Amino acid sequence: MKVTNDVLTELVHIRNAIDDAYAKLDVALYEKKTAAKVSYSDVKPFDLVSDNFEYIVQRINNIRDGAEVVGDE
């Protein structure tokens, strides 16, 4: 795949944004369970979207690693 340096720069920015989102989502939150007695269960928001993040990161890495830089020479 042929890309320009601008595209590679944008891929780096996208990857950094994904890494930042991962860091923000990889925290423990607690979901309230109401019954006769109130209890809380540990929930990690990242677990709900980890497959999506993995897919996006794999595609970005494939594009970056297989890219042939054109222009800006």
Image: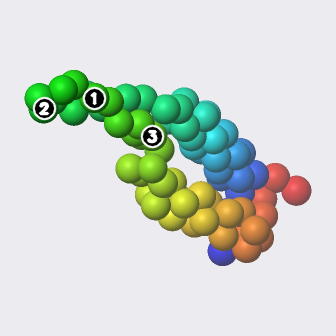
Amino acid carrying mark 2 in the image = Ala
Q: Is residue 2 above or below residue 25?
A: below
Q: Which residue is mark 1?
A: 39
Labelled pair 2, 1 in contact (Cβ < 8 Å): yes
What distance separates the C-alpha of mark 2 from that of mark 3?
22 Å
Q: Which residue is mark 2?
A: 35
Amino acid carrying mark 1 in the image = Ser
Q: Residue at x 18, y 26 (%)?
A: 37
Disc 2 crowd rating (10 Å Cα; few below 14, some 14-19, many 20+) is: few
| SS for callout 1 | strand
Disc 1 crowd rating (10 Å Cα; few below 14, some 14-19, many 20+) is: few
Q: Position of residue 70 (x, y in %)?
A: 76, 64
Disc 3 crowd rating (10 Å Cα; few below 14, some 14-19, many 20+) is: some
What distance separates the C-alpha of mark 2 from that of mark 1?
8 Å
Specify the label residue 44 is tagged with. 3
Q: Position of residue 3 (x, y in %)?
A: 68, 63
Q: Residue at x 11, y 29 (%)?
A: 36
Q: Nearer the viewer, mark 3 or mark 1?
A: 1
Specify the label residue 56 is tagged with. none
Which of the 4 image quadrants contains residue 35? top left
